[in-house]
Amino acid sequence: MQAQASLKQAREWLSQGMFAEAWEMLLSLRREFEANPPDKPLLLDMWRGLLTLAQARSDARMVQEIVPKMLQAGREQFEFDSSQMGALLHHAGQALAAIGAGSDAETFFMQAYRRLPDEKKPRHDYGLQLAYFYASYGHLDQALRWAKEAAGKSSSPEELMLAHRAICCFYDAQGKSLEAAGLRQQGQASIPDQNPGWILIDQARSQRRLGLASRADALYREGLAHLPDGDKARIYREIALNLLSRRDLAGAEAALVEGAQWVNPVSFEAQLLRAEQARLWQFQGRFAETETVVQEILALWCERFSPHHPVCLRLREVLVEISILRRDWMQGIGRAEELLRISAGAYGSEHPCVARALYWMGQVWLYEGAREQAKQAFVQAQMIWDEWGDFSEVERALIHFGLGLIFADELEFYKAEDEMKKACDLIEQRGLGNQALVLGHLLSARGDICRVTGRDRQAQECGQRSQELLRPKK
């Protein structure tokens, strides 16, 4: 009975985001079970809980250790081809995908898929679930393949529309917006009586990725009229970000204020809109107002979620950036160290959150002029990102960019250009998508370095491409 109570408590902590407490409880149960083997269901529940936490912590070693133990515990209770084993195989696949073991994960997902009922709907739903799961980790090829699998298993026009919407989103993310637009038109023609709201929103997102902000704005506004009230706030946030890409700060702030009217003032969505509004103030140089709002939201979210929740870590990054803009290096380093401490304490020293904290620490050192400390932080961050493959093109690019700036300050211009080139290549290898502005700024810096080394033709080419990407489009 005590073990059952402990498992129940661990599940509650896990659902509340209290990972450290749940982790210690389950490790204690593991030691107890190794000394006194429990009933099989209890053992399986313990392994499932540990795997969930290992996945959340991105602990690759622990995931690899637990997966076979969990599956063996399942085999001792369920038939090999049963749906229960399918659920365990799916859980194993999710954990392996989260640590970057994509080929192993795909094997488990296929085995789980094979154990589904031989009916179209469950296979359609599972295909979509996997498509969005892979997309959340940046594996767009696998996401697209599973979305197409879901489309092939659709048994109604509505199911086919859901699959096509997913396919279009992944096309957009890959820079294939023309293919996405064609498929959306085909879907709209096949179901003419459907609510056009989300189709219009998807079209707006496609135009936004192409950099056509004015067209996107018109489609967003048209789509809003057809959406349920509960979905409007997050679309207003997208409208604000789209207007921001046109340097329309006043229009972006007006959209955020309008969006706030559709949500409860204390809801997560309302605070997200406030955070975006604070970022607009930051662009306007209103640092004190930005800092006050960000700290208020951070305190609220730390209480509601946990200090190491990704949204809380992102807000801490904003505070570090404000310190840099104010040229308050001591405060900036203190905030970056706190960000690093919270990230490493929650996720371990080899996690992307730690790499992001090191990046911001390097940024503070770089702007202060402490090049050696900045270089050390960037190199540490780069080592972590390199272990995470294709999850982090933009972050890895910014690390190379930071190293390039350091080499330029040290008058090692050829090394600087090499780092700048690596940064540009990382952004370009997946198509521009939403990163056109990032690439534009990187190319501008690379062009400056080429000009210093006397490579005028390369400098001119970089400058022209940079201007094309940074010029607001209609």
Image (tube, helix red, strand yellow):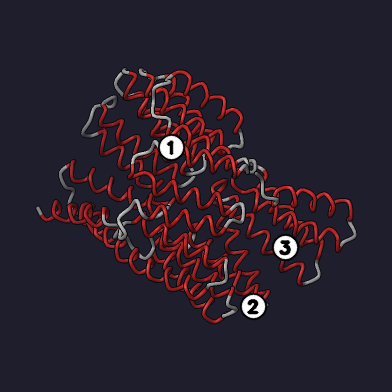
Mark 2 vs mark 3, foreground winner is 2
Foreground residue, 103 or 466? Answer: 466
Q: Amino acid at mark 3?
A: Gly
Which of the two discs, 2 and 3, labels the residue nearer the N terminus? 2
Say what secondary structure mark 1 lies in: helix
Residue at image position (50%, 66%) is 317
State the residue position of label 3: 404
Measure the C-alpha gap from mark 3 to mark 1. Answer: 35 Å
Q: In the image, residue 92 lies at what x, y percent?
A: 36, 39
- Give the CA distance from mark 2 to mark 1: 42 Å
Residue under numbered circle 2: 368
Q: Which mark is residue 143?
A: none
SS of the residue at dot 3? helix
Most extreme residue toward the left is 1
The residues bearing labels 2 and 3 have C-alpha atoms spaced at a distance of 16 Å
Q: Is residue 430 above or below residue 297?
A: above
Give residue 397's position: percent from left, percent from top: 64, 55
Q: Is residue 263 toward the left or the right of residue 255 in the image?
A: left
Label disc, if present, on residue 132 of the rendered structure = 1
Q: What amino acid is labelled 2 in the image?
A: Glu
Instruction: Report crowding for label 3: few under 14, some 14 to 19, many 20 or more residues within 10 A (C-alpha).
Output: many
Label 1 crowd bin: few (<14), some (14–19), many (20+), radius 10 Å: many
Q: Earlier in the sequence, mark 3 or mark 1?
A: 1
**Image location of residue 351, percent across then percent down:** 48, 58
Vertical side of 62 occupied by 182: above or below: above
- At label 1, the amino acid type is Tyr
Indicate the secondary structure of the residue bearing disc 2. Answer: helix
Asked whether 174 or 417 is in front, the reply is 174
Residue at image location 35% in from the left, 40% down from the top = 68
- In the image, is residue 187 above or below residue 406? above
Check the picture and name the quadrant holding the C terminus.
top right
Residue 119: quarter of image: top left
